Image (spheres, grey):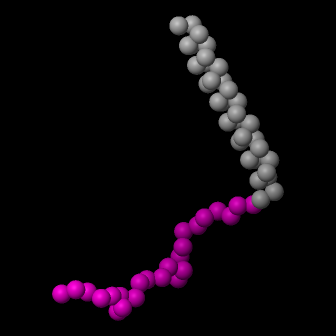
Amino acid sequence: MMAVIVNTLLVTVATYTVTIAADQVIKFLQRDRQMPFISQPTNSEMRTRDRSGLNRRQ
């Protein structure tokens, strides 16, 4: 039973370590990239659908 608990702890620590390392690699690779913020479109940028081309069954 003790082996199961130790194995679970080892897997948890290893997973955490790999995750932290992967995050650091991603931050390193993207440090020079500037990502623009996504803003809400204004009314002039929004387009409405043209409903005249719809085929309606009656």
Residue that extends furthest to the left in the rendered view of this protein: 58
Residue that extends furthest to the top in the rendered view of this protein: 2
Residue 20: x, y in percent?
70, 35
Position of 9 relative to 21 (above/below): above
Q: Is residue 36 magenta?
A: yes
Choose between 51 and 36: the one closer to the eye: 51
Please report the residue visible at 80 percent of the width from the left and 47 percent of the height from the top: 28
Hey, which quadrant is residue 17 in on the image? top right
Q: Is residue 8 left or right of residue 50?
A: right
Position of 24 relative to 1 (above/below): below
Residue 24: x, y in percent?
75, 41
Please report the residue visible at 77 percent of the width from the left and 59 percent of the height from the top: 33
Residue 15: x, y in percent?
65, 30
Choose between 57 and 40: the one closer to the eye: 57
Q: Is residue 58 left or right of residue 35?
A: left
Please report the residue visible at 60 percent of the width from the left and 64 percent of the height from the top: 38
Q: Is residue 15 left or right of residue 4?
A: right
Quarter of the image where the C terminus is located: bottom left
Q: Main secondary structure of the magenta part?
A: loop
Which stretch appears magenta?
34-58
Position of 5 relative to 29 (above/below): above
Hey, which quadrant is residue 3 in on the image? top right
Please report the residue visible at 77 percent of the width from the left and 44 percent of the height from the top: 25
Instruction: State the count of labels.
Output: 0
Hey, which quadrant is residue 2 in on the image? top right
Q: Is residue 44 magenta?
A: yes
